[in-house]
Amino acid sequence: MSDVIYSVNGPVVTVRDTQTFSMMEMVYVGEAGLIGEVISVTRERTTIQVYEDTAGLRVGEPVKGSGAPLSATLGPGIMQNIFDGIEWPLADIAAQSGAFIATGVRAPSLPADKKWDVTVVVKTGDYVRGGDFIATCPETSIITHRSMVPPNVSGTVTWAAENGQYTVNDPICRVRADDGHEVTLTLAQKWPIRMPRPVRGRHSIDRPLITGQRVIDTLFPIAKGGAAAVPGGFGTGKTMTQHQLAKWCDADIIVYVGCGERGNEMTQVLDEFSELEDPKSGKPMTERTVLIANTSNMPVAAREASIYTGVTLAE
């Protein structure tokens, strides 16, 4: 017997009498396959938070599990892109449905058909562990993407591809893991957005981040590897300060998350960044920028997820 919707209350959907789903699992809700996440599991009912508009959703429509948590796809193709809070590429979706995005429209997070000029940096017999590089490719004219072994994989390389052109889903190498099973690695990998990337060690914070704003650099200096907050009320300039930091600081890559921003503010970012020249390279600023646009008219749950998505892409 398939699982069906028992009740709909705004973005919250419940399913009765099921033991199919696990906590934090990503699920597909309704005939349109809306993206949702399991937020509560009891013997009587499973509660799902839906990240898309639930208008028109009806009791009795199917709910299907994915068997995996809500994840981000990491690989070449992230830079210069504009995503929503769950990493749907907005430009590709707009090409399908126009300015007003239709419910249930889908597109792969990374371009599946594009071929990248890949240099494979491992060879048969190498021992690799999580975080080691397996291949590099020029993602933009100023950013080289380095594909890595996932953090939970370590073992011996049994096969490596030749240098050449590959898509994000083509096999790059195979690794016989320490437990004996073989893992095929590609340029892209999926990572649960609510699970932090593990680290081997932490560098001491000893270098300043030059923001380009002299009042901040002088009175409120920020360190590379550190964090900073800009608190304030409505209309006090928080977003404009964020814009200035993104434009002029000496970071290598900018991941701009517009969580709950007004639509016109995100439009301003898009317009300005496409016109700006990167002071480091003289290339367009967009070549080292990725935008996550989750405006104030989006579901609250999707806005919360956009923060985790942005942090996962940045990590």
Image (cartoon, rainbow, N blue to C red):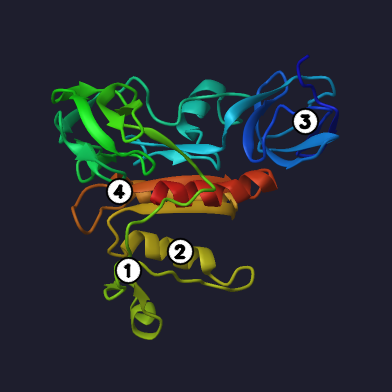
Labelled pair 2, 3 in contact (Cβ < 8 Å)? no
Disc 4 versus disc 1: nearer the observer: 1
Q: For marks 4 and 1, give the CA distance.
A: 17 Å
Q: Do the residues labelled 4 and 1 touch (CB within 8 Å)?
A: no
Q: Which is nearer the N-term, disc 4 or disc 3?
A: 3
279 vs 315, nearest the viewer:
315
Against 142, is 122 above or below? Answer: above
The amino acid pointed to by label 3 is Ala
Q: How far apart are marks 4 and 2 (CA)?
A: 16 Å
Residue that numbered label 2 is attached to:
242
* Residue, disc 3: 55
Q: Is mark 3 on a helix, strand or loop?
A: loop
- Residue 212 lies, in percent from the top left, at 31, 71
Label 1 belongs to which residue? 224
Give left or right: position of 262 versus 94. right
| In the depicted structure, whether residue 37 falls above or below residue 257 | above
Dot 2 surroundings within 10 Å: few (below 14), some, or many (20 or more)? few
> Gap in Å between the C-alphas at discs 4 and 3?
37 Å
The residues bearing labels 2 and 3 have C-alpha atoms spaced at a distance of: 34 Å
Which mark sits nearer the N-terminus, 1 or 2?
A: 1
For badge 2, the amino acid type reads Gln
The foreground one among 269 and 121 is 121
Residue occupying the point 54% across, 52% down? 307
- Proximity of marks 1 and 3: CB atoms separated by less than 8 Å: no
